[in-house]
Image (spheres, rainbow, N blue to C red):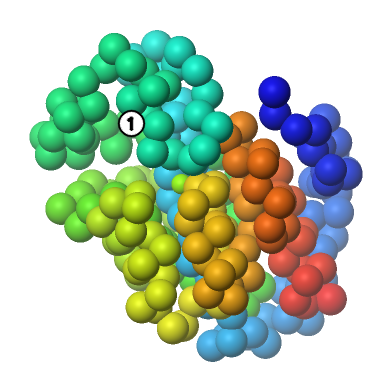
Amino acid sequence: MPKELSSPYEVHNGFKISWDYHQMVARAIKAGYNRSQGEKMIAIDIHDTLGDYILAMCQRYGPPKQWPGDGHNTLDRMWPSVDMRAHFTPDNHGAFLSTVPVFLDAPNSVWRLRQMGFEFCYFTATPPMYRAAVTDWIGINLFPPAELRMADGWDNKGEALKKMEDITMLIDDSPATLLAAVDLGITVYVYDRPWNRDVTVGTRVVGWHHLLWQLGRDFLS
Ligand SMILES: [Mg+2]
């Protein structure tokens, strides 16, 4: 059973998030524009942070047999009857990536992040051979253009972060990546998903409005 959320910003409290969010963003844009340029470089995960990879899996293969308890490297346990090698063949996976539904509050929020003065890059575990597919997805879903960094595999994001000295913050859903980032002294925001409820490091956020509200409070107020 997932743990209860400790945040006051439960999903049912969306109106309060929305109201606080609009006020905070207006204040932050007025007071904080460009203030943090060059100081706070945020790595933004893509799958299950900007778009719902798992929902795309459900749409393609049906509901999972079980939810993972320890991160993302468990797709084969969630869909044991699916041939994951076939799923990850270049032709299939490239096309599959285009079907990942965007989280509706994400694109405008990432634009807001830029207006608030934060620098960011997109940071995905998806291998470089899918650069065109991921770049298309970013553009089609109307996210702001920014550098796309590809770590080449879920297990490699921690190692990749080690080599990126400019990253000071990470927003991600993957427990392994979040824990690796904390070890590197990176400030982490846990994008709430059912499989990361055991993660106790960093700050948990429920959706993008909550994240922006939190960033404004942490860095611009
Ligand atoms: Mg992810």
Amino acid type at image mark 1: Thr
Element class at badge 1: loop
Quadrant of image for the N terminus: top right
Quadrant in the rendering for residue 116: bottom right
> Is any part of residue 137 visible from this angle?
yes
Compare residues 212 and 19 and report the one nearer the observer: 212
Residue in the picture at 70% in, 29% down = 2
The answer to whether residue 24 is left or right of residue 152 is right
Q: Residue at x 63, y 70 (%)?
A: 187
Is 98 placed above or below 120 here? above
* In the rendered image, the vertical position of residue 186 relative to residue 44, given as above or below: below
**Residue at image point 40% right, 32% down:** 74
Q: Is residue 107 in sight in this rendering?
A: no
Q: Up-down: is 96 above or below 149? A: above
Tag 1: Cα neighbours inside 10 Å, few (<14), some, or many (≥20)? some
Quadrant occupied by the C terminus? bottom right
Q: Could you say where residue 30 lies in the image, as x and y percent from the top left?
A: 77, 77
* Picture coordinates of residue 90, whole percent (x, y): 13, 39
Left or right? Give the position of 17 relative to 103. Answer: right
Q: Is residue 191 left or right of residue 134?
A: right
Q: Position of residue 57 (x, y in %)?
A: 37, 24
Task: Decide if ligand 1 comes within 8 Å of the CB at mark 1.
Answer: no
Task: Write down the residue under mark 1.
Answer: 99
What residue is shown at x 49% (from left), y 76% (from top)?
Answer: 167
In the displayed structure image, the side of residue 38 where residue 89 appears, left or right = left
Where residue 62 sits: x, y (%)? 40, 11
**How many circles with numbers are drawn on the protein?**
1
